[in-house]
Amino acid sequence: MDEHLLEVKNLKVSFKVGKKKLTAVDNVTFSLDRGKVIGIVGESGCGKSVTATSIMRLVSPSVCEIDENSQILFEGEDLSKASEARMRKVRGNEISMIFQEPMSSLNPVYRIGDQMLEMIRTHHREIPKKEALKQCIEMLARVGIPSPEQRIREFPHQMSGGMRQRVMIAMALLCQPKLLIADEPTTALDVTIQAQILRILKKLAEESDTSVILITHDMGVVAEMADHVMVMYAGKSVEYGTAEDIFDHPMHPYTVGLLKSIPKLGSGQEDHLFTIEGTVPGLDEMPAGCRFSTRCPYATEQCKKEDPGMQGEAGHFVRCFRFMDPEIQDSREVE
Ligand SMILES: Nc1ncnc2c1ncn2[C@@H]1O[C@H](COP(=O)(O)OP(=O)(O)O)[C@@H](O)[C@H]1O
Ligand SMILES: [Mg+2]
């Protein structure tokens, strides 16, 4: 099959705030093949979570609208127009999601095992309880939880943050989804645990041929896992390419800034890292022209007036007028 598992085309998502309509995700387009990982990267407020929750259709239609020209093609079916009943079948079964804070998705009053059983039996009522329980224990073992037969009887608060995030991964993969969306899955954890969790996620996704959308503000996390990368800034995709394109030949000044902000382990420089000056604009204060122009050291008058649009070739695209400019090219030396 050469069809993409997921094709997001011109995704545009707006919030109704009072009388205003504020666009949080603006014409985002990307695709994902079976068994592959795409990293979606950008600082906080760039529209990553809105993109993810729109794919899952977890945005409430009363406050948030997916534009009718947007398409979210999952195995060819446009989820942006699917019924709520259809989406309930898709969620947790064909597409699963893990969030940054496992405590908000795990129910504190139920044992881990009961929550996992519920997950299986919601989607596969035909599986006998004993068999389902066996699957839960096996899954906990696969995410590296020691003595799963005992731990399955624990409540979420009895586990560490890292263990809870493993449980979330186990639950997300229980029904063998075709797509897993992980939104900042390791942000709340310390660096060593982060690396362990990412390794588990990558291994399990590979073993089960699950495609992954990995969302993070941290380029270091993407480097570990992604085949393709989309960099988002202020609701727009500003650079898209293979991980090699993005890490070895970044073209957008914003991407270069993100790469320069990756902490180098053991370098002793963790305290005085490079940071991109300024902040991501709010939805009601978007600059005209290139949205990054207000923070970009290379912005020209043209950049402040016109949107560059996506340019490029051979699968590597960038939203920048000056990407061929020698001054910009020299700035890309990220050692
Ligand atoms: N429910 C909401 N109502 C209004 N604006 C929102 C809502 N949720 C998110 N936003 C805005 O949408 C933008 C993108 O948010 P988000 O997708 O959460 O960013 P990210 O995940 O990249 O940090 C931000 O400007 C945020 O303030
Ligand atoms: Mg987010």
Image (spheres, rainbow, N blue to C red):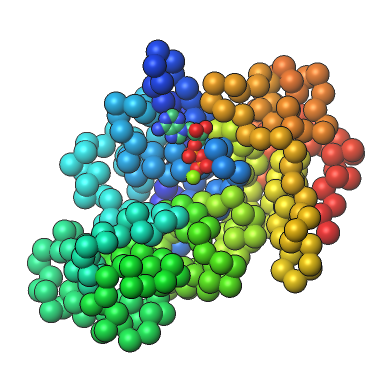
Residue at 29%, 80% (x, y): give it.
151
The quarter of the image holding the N terminus is bottom left
Residue at 34%, 44% (x, y): give it.
56
Question: For this rendering, which residue is in front, 3 or 144?
Answer: 144
> Image check: 196 left or right of 264?
left
Q: Is 50 located above or below residue 333 in the figure?
A: above
Residue at 46%, 43% (x, y): give it.
49
The quarter of the image holding the C terminus is bottom right
Residue at 47%, 22% (x, y): give it.
22
List x then y, in percent, for residue 270.
74, 61
> Image check: 210 left or right of 229?
left
List x then y, in percent, for residue 103.
36, 59
List x then y, in percent, for residue 57.
32, 40
Residue furthest to the bottom: 147
Q: Is 131 located above or below residue 261 in the figure?
A: below
Residue furthest to the top: 19
**Number of marks in the image?**
0
Quadrant in the rendering for residue 50:
top left
Question: For this rendering, which residue is in front, 68 or 47?
Answer: 47
Q: Is 57 located above or below residue 195 in the figure?
A: above
Question: Is residue 70 in view from this perspective?
Answer: no
Question: Is residue 139 in view from this perspective?
Answer: yes
List x then y, in percent, for residue 324.
82, 37
> Image check: 144 left or right of 263?
left
Quadrant in the rendering for residue 127:
bottom left
